[in-house]
Structure formats: C-alpha cells, structure tokens
Image (spheres, helix red, strand yellow):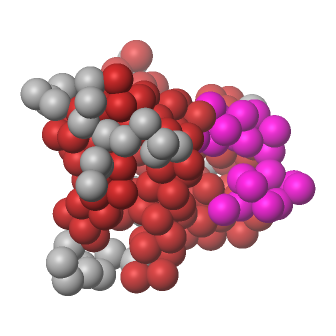
C-alpha cells in the first residue's frame, strides 16, 4: 500500500513539474495535473493541500535537479570551468527553469514559499561560483581585482540568459565551453 501511495505522489509531482514548467504558476491547472497523473483532484490535495503546496514541492524537485554540486578539481581554474559548464548544461536540461526563475523575481503573485526556495537556490549557486573565484585569487590563479560576486552574477545571468534566448539550441562554440573560458580569461592574470 505504501509503495502505491509513494508512486502516486511521485506521479503527481512529475505531472506538476511538467505542467508548471510549461504553463508557469499562474497558468498551470490542477485539473491537467490530476489528469496527467491519472489521479483525482482530491488525492492531489490530500498530498499537497493546495496549488501553492504542489507548486512548492514541484519547484523543490526542479531546483534540486538544477543544483550543481561544487566540483572537485586540481585547480581553481578547473573547478570554475566545471561549475560554469555544469550550470549551463543544467539550466538547459531543466524544462521551465528559466521562466520560473524570472517569475520568482518579477511576479508579485509568486507563492512566498516558492520564492524562498528560488532565493536560497540562487544564493547557494552564487556562493559556490564566488568561492571558486576567491580560491583562485588566494592560490594565485586569478587577479586580486576580479570581483568574485560580480563574476558569479554575470555567470548566472549569462547561463540563464542564453537559455532564455536560444532555448536548447547549441551555440557554436558550445556555450557550456565558451562561458567558462570567457570568465576564467577575465579573472586570469594578463
């Protein structure tokens, strides 16, 4: 019985991720989510209580997938390249994440719990990027005048921006290679 309940909850979350990625919070419909998960609305509300609760749970799963781990590399340059490349690949591979990130920043009707998740994810990611730059400065790989927080903000904006503009189209050279090279070159001693 517990396996079936866990499976239904998982099915609901998968359907919700697809619906919210496609339609956003405001455009998503509980009826479509229930139909896609092959459950009734009452069961959906049993697990998640509200559309906001379902959205927050689905967003948590989306951001967990989009949460790039801090890479382990021989040098801060390798770490920064890995982290930036993984960021671009991740943002490209998670349907709807760009729209959700934009919505969280600009839509006053965005659910507060979901906004907190986005803010925490963004803060973690910016912290990892800035830490890689600071480590590179400390170890002599990067210039002391490179602004770690500025580099982190540009990296996140560029990764999200290229997906917003180009979708999943591959740039030439691939953006997941170009962005790390660009930012590492910016930070490097000349």
Give yes or no for residue 14 being in the magenta stretch.
no
Q: Magenta segment range?
A: 102-122
Decide if residue 183 is in sight here. no
Task: Determine whether, in the image, residue 49 is placed left or right of residue 66.
Answer: right
Relative to 127, residue 150 above or below = below
Give the residue displayed 45% in from the left and 55% down from the top.
Answer: 155
Of all residues, the one furthest to the right in this rendering is: 108
Of all residues, the one furthest to the top in this rendering is: 2
Decide if residue 26 is in sight here. yes
- Viewer-proximal residue among 158 and 169: 158
Task: Determine whether, in the image, residue 94 is placed left or right of residue 9.
Answer: left
Residue 64: which quarter of the image? top left
- Viewer-proximal residue among 175 and 183: 183
Of all residues, the one furthest to the left in this rendering is: 74
Whole-percent x, y for residue 25 in the image: 71, 58
Relative to 69, residue 95 above or below = below
Whole-percent x, y for residue 43 in the image: 62, 37
Whole-percent x, y for residue 72 in the image: 18, 26
Whole-percent x, y for residue 29 in the image: 69, 63
Task: Determine whether, in the image, residue 88 is placed left or right of residue 42.
Answer: left
Which image quadrant: the C terminus? bottom left
Number of numbered callouts drawn: 0
Task: Determine whether, in the image, residue 92 is placed left or right of residue 141.
Answer: right
Residue 117: which quarter of the image? top right
Give the residue displayed 23% in from the left and 47% down from the top.
Answer: 81
Magenta stretch, main secondary structure class: helix
Give the residue displayed 67% in from the left and 38% down from the top.
Answer: 119
Give yes or no for residue 114 being in the magenta stretch.
yes
Which image quadrant: the N terminus? top left
Give the residue displayed 17% in from the left and 40% down from the top.
Answer: 78
Of all residues, the one furthest to the front in this rendering is: 190
Residue 44: which quarter of the image? top right
């Amino acid at each position: 019985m517990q396996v079936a309940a866990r499976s239904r909850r998982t099915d609901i979350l998968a359907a919700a991720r697809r619906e919210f990625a496609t339609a956003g919070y405001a455009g998503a419909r509980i009826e479509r989510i229930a139909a896609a998960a092959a459950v009734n609305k009452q069961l959906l509300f049993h697990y998640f209580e509200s559309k906001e609760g379902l959205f927050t749970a689905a967003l948590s799963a989306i951001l967990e997938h989009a949460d790039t781990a801090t890479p382990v590399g021989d040098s801060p340059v390798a770490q920064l390249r890995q982290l930036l490349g993984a960021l671009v690949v991740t943002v490209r591979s998670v349907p709807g994440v760009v729209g959700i990130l934009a919505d969280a920043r600009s839509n006053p009707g965005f659910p507060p719990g979901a906004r907190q998740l986005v803010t925490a994810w963004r803060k973690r990611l910016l912290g990892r990027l800035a830490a890689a730059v600071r480590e590179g400065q400390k170890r002599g790989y990067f210039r002391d005048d490179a602004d770690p927080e500025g580099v982190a903000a540009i990296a996140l904006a560029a990764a999200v921006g290229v997906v917003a503009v180009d979708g999943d189209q591959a740039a030439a050279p691939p953006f997941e290679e170009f962005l790390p090279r660009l930012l590492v070159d910016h930070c490097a001693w000349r």
